[in-house]
Image (cartoon, grey):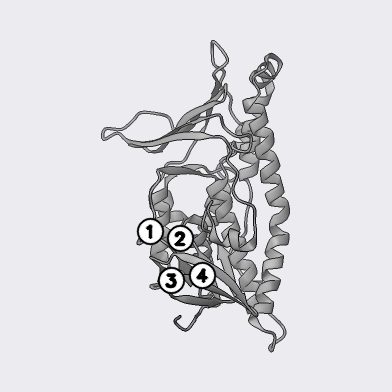
Amino acid sequence: MESAINEDIVIVGAGIAGLSTALGLHRLGIRSLVLEWSESLRNTGFALTMWTNAWRALDAVGVGAILREKSLQIQGFQVSSWNSSLPSSVKAPEADLKPEKFESRCLRRKDLLETLERELPQGAIRYSSKIVSIEESGIFKLVHLSDGSVFRAKVVIGCDGVNSMVAKWLGLENPVSAGRSAIRGFVVYPNGHGFEPKFHAYFGAGLRCGFMPCSDKSLYWFCTFNPSLFNYIGQGGSSALEDSIVLARCLAESLLTGNEKDEEDYVKMERGLKKYEKDRRWRSFNLITTSYVVGLIQESDGKVMSFLKKKFLSKYTMGALVTMADFDCDKLIVS
């Protein structure tokens, strides 16, 4: 076995969460290393909805302006039900869609990942780095790679997706199928598509379809079958960006503002991680519960619920989407 390579902070996975966490730390002057199993950046996939909270996070790491040039501001919602002969459309309250409170754009995943990667310093990402095991060694974590390399870290951050090696090392339960299938696509219209810059969606009977313009000449479309109740506020990528800013700030505050000069870095990092856990607990709870309630409303197809959805609840669900997006992770400043 080769001698271990020392890295204070190792981030596993060069996806949205991993790259944005690394960039947040970099902006605060703290080095980290991202380990990615693939040979290059995995920019497959089509597009994702970036809500207000995501754009605030992207502004915090200094890439918001760059990515706005590659996307189109969404001006509203056009949501209908399959269970009506004349589908009803709803809108979120106009007050909720004011520019200072609401910003939503459909952004190509490729553009997001490549922008984050470009902003990182040379050598911040190590590709072709497949993890085979992680073990404790005193205060350190030893990360073993398939090529025989070993990294000795004080903190290991798992951003490696559904089949996470870090999650397995921590003893977390295996992923559970949500019973959902999806088809997604990205279409380019050389002469323009002519659709309004709105989120267009159709719900009901276990089916959810829709589309959203990314630009004047491109749009993202989707169709999901038998969706899970925990699937309707579209906050996966946005909340991951929130997490990355808060985590980077908590770690930086613990490392850069400690009063005890002789205190070990790993003790400071542990304190930062505990603060992160505390700061994110209620936000995570709100996201989960809102997702469940919105999913329950959209997927309940009884006559009474269908009537209530048409008259009242659809407006509530749109309002909930906007409310959950109106979250500010704050700036990357160490106090």
Residue drawn at 46 percent across, 41 percent down: 73
Question: Residue 54 placed where, x, y %?
Answer: 54, 51
**Label 3 near label 1: C-beta < 8 Å?**
no
Q: Whole-Å distance between the Cαs marked 2 and 1?
A: 7 Å
| Residue that extends furthest to the top in the rendered view of this protein | 85
For label 4, the residue is 27
For label 2, the residue is 14
Q: Whole-Å distance between the Cαs marked 2 and 3?
A: 10 Å
| Other residues around mark 2 within 10 Å, as few (<14) / some (14–19) / many (≥20) | many
Q: Compare marks 1 and 3 and give the one earlier in the sequence.
A: 1
Q: Amino acid at mark 4?
A: Arg
Q: Compare marks 3 and 4 and give the one earlier in the sequence.
A: 4
Q: Compare marks 2 and 1 and give the one earlier in the sequence.
A: 2
Q: Amino acid at mark 3?
A: Ala
Question: Residue 318 placed where, x, y %?
Answer: 61, 32
| Other residues around mark 3 within 10 Å, as few (<14) / some (14–19) / many (≥20) | some
Residue drawn at 41 percent across, 62 percent down: 117
Q: Is residue 237 left or right of residue 303?
A: left
For label 3, the residue is 124
Q: Whole-Å distance between the Cαs marked 1 and 4?
A: 21 Å
Q: Is residue 285 left or right of residue 101?
A: right
Occupied quadrant, residue 195? top left
Task: Give the vertical position of 258 relative to 229 (above or below).
Answer: below
Q: Is residue 28 visible in this depiction of the protein?
A: no
Task: Give the vertical position of 75 relative to 15 (above or below).
Answer: above
Q: Whole-Å distance between the Cαs marked 3 and 4?
A: 13 Å
Q: Whole-Å distance between the Cαs marked 1 and 3?
A: 13 Å
Q: Compare marks 2 and 3 and give the one earlier in the sequence.
A: 2
Q: Amino acid at mark 2?
A: Ala
Residue drawn at 53 percent across, 26 percent down: 207
Which dot marks residue 62? none
